[in-house]
Image: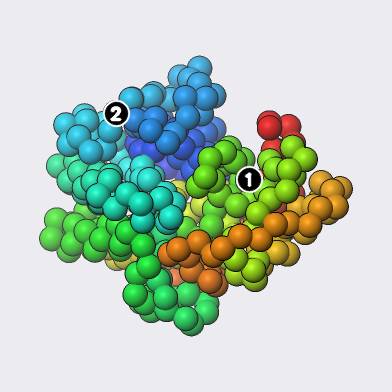
Amino acid sequence: MGYKDIKFPEGSTFLVTGGAGFIGSNLCEAITDLGYNVRCLDDLSTGKQANVDLLADRANYTFIKGDIKDLDTCMKACEGVDYVLNQAAWGSVPRSIEMPLFYCQNNIAGTLNMMEAARQQGIKKFVYASSSSVYGDHPVLPKKEGQEGNLLSPYALTKRVDEEYGKLYYKLYGLDTYGLRYFNVFGRRQDPNGAYAAVIPKFIKQLLAGETPTINGDGKQSRDFTYIENVIEANLKACLAPHEAAGEAYNVAYGGREYLLDIYYDLCKALDIEREPNFGPDRPGDIKHSNADISKAKEKLGYDPDYDFAKGIALAIEWYKENL
């Protein structure tokens, strides 16, 4: 059923941190579309002003420019809020290897500030972004909660620590926290630019511009690519999940498995382009294969994703054709 029929009490207010980013801005848009109030908190370090401007004329949308590394900012942002969707974080495994201290300050201390502010302000539900990177080098597929390996990057470590804090805040303080382990999310407004851009928008942009994309490694690595609509559904359903389901982390994916090389050729075919890719070295810290078992999220959150890879990639390609 997706999320369009989900109902919250009238006048409910959501705080979306990182709301000017790819996932955050889609959450803000979806929630305001449903008629509820959204407060977006973002320092615009990786988020985009254009994503704020997109919603600026909506009466039920408010933007606060601020940093989750500042507790006072978090406290003020949480005043009068019912639900927190904490998406604010710096992404990218390779960049975290270059900047471990900053990732600790932003992704761990910042998330802890938000949990503490949510606790003090009496927030109903605290839903936060985790990542499939917490599975590390555990070889078994599909990835199942409770079967994690050795971590491979500072980014993965920050997300694992966030989950441990989420568990503690539930057990010690009774804050309903829900960690969502995102698996390779893609879709409209995902940034195709920069050295750390996600692979799908980057490939599309390069192909449309007549350039030849470079695949890191042999292209035989696989991912559980997850369309943005599924992620919106998971966040909203977590806000309605029972207290008994809190204090835990959940895989958020479709449950499929796509190989990078196949995706490259699928994009070429969809764009009517014939061009062989370049191949580069493997990226440090990358997991070779990723595929999610989503049965726990289905059972405890009522998560039931509508968008498989084929449906999602068709919509994403159309969006990039119109907006690049």
The foreground one among 101 and 119 is 101
The numbered dot on residue 201 is: 1
Above or below residue 194? Residue 169 is below
Looking at the rendered structure, the secondary structure element under dot 2 is loop
Q: Position of residue 280 (x, y in %)?
A: 61, 60
Distance of label 2 from label 1 (alpha carbons)? 28 Å
In this picture, residue 164 sits left or right of residue 225: left
**Residue 214 visible in the current orientation:** yes
Residue at left offset 47%, top offset 81%: 139
Image quadrant occupied by the C terminus: top right
Q: Position of residue 285 (x, y in %)?
A: 43, 64
Which residue is at the far top? 57
* Residue 109 location (% of width, % of height): 21, 47
Residue at image point 52% right, 34% down: 29
User: Which class describes the residues within 10 Å of circle 2: few (<14), some (14-19), or many (20+)?
Assistant: some
> Looking at the image, is mark 2 or mark 1 earlier in the sequence?
2
**In which quadrant of the rendered image does the N terminus lie?**
bottom right
The residue labelled by disc 2 is 66
Give the vertical position of 208 relative to 272 (above or below): above
